[in-house]
Image: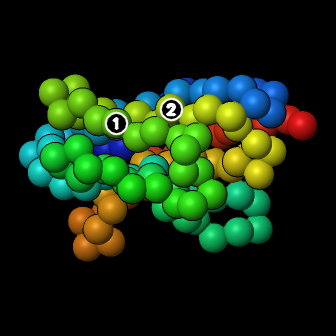
Amino acid sequence: QVQLVESGGGLVQAGGSLRLSCAASGTGTIFRGNAMGWYRQAPGKQRELVAGITSGGYTNYAESVKGRFSISRDNVKNTVYLQMNSLKPEDTALYYCNMVSPLLQQNWGQGTQVTVSS
């Protein structure tokens, strides 16, 4: 199992920026060889994938964050990042990272809370 620890969340005004980090410990091979994603879950809503990055660095984004969020990874540090710019109140959620493939997903971490005030 890989342990996933998210950090970097906080309270920010609309239009602001945050950079989230997710450190993976345990089996680094699983992290380095597979696509990673950032997910978020707002109160009363299902968890959704907002950004993904393959082991080779190809990225994709949900329409709601395209052009504002940027995902990256450091395969030496086993860390994946999410740069969030032009934040909106609707981005308020608990943010998690995990493998993109449901078959490879690890236990969910505690997440990091992002709150955007209007």
Q: CA distance from mark 1 to mark 2?
A: 8 Å
Residue tagged 2: 83
User: Which residue is found at the position 52% from the left and 60% from the top?
Assistant: 62
Q: Callout 1: 10 Å neighbours few (<14), some, many (20+)?
A: many
User: Which residue is found at the position 80% from the left and 33% from the top?
Assistant: 14
Q: Quadrant of the C terminus?
A: top right
Q: Answer with the quarter of the image where residue 112 lies.
A: top right
Tag 2, which secondary structure? strand
User: x%, y% of residue 54?
Assistant: 24, 52
**Sequence-first tag of 1 and 2:** 1
Disc number placed over residue 72 in the picture, else none? 1
User: x%, y% of residue 93?
Assistant: 68, 49
Q: Is residue 36 left or right of residue 55?
A: right
Q: Amino acid at mark 1?
A: Ser
User: x%, y% of residue 79?
Assistant: 30, 33
Q: Is residue 73 left or right of residue 90?
A: left
Tag 1, which secondary structure? strand
In terms of depth relative to the viewer, which is nearer, 83 or 104? 83
Q: Is residue 24 left or right of residue 114?
A: left
- Determine contact: label 1, label 2, CB under 8 Å: yes
Q: Is residue 61 above or below residue 8?
A: below
User: Which residue is found at the position 46% from the left and 55% from the top?
Assistant: 61
User: x%, y% of residue 31?
Assistant: 20, 46
Q: Is residue 65 above or below residue 101?
A: above
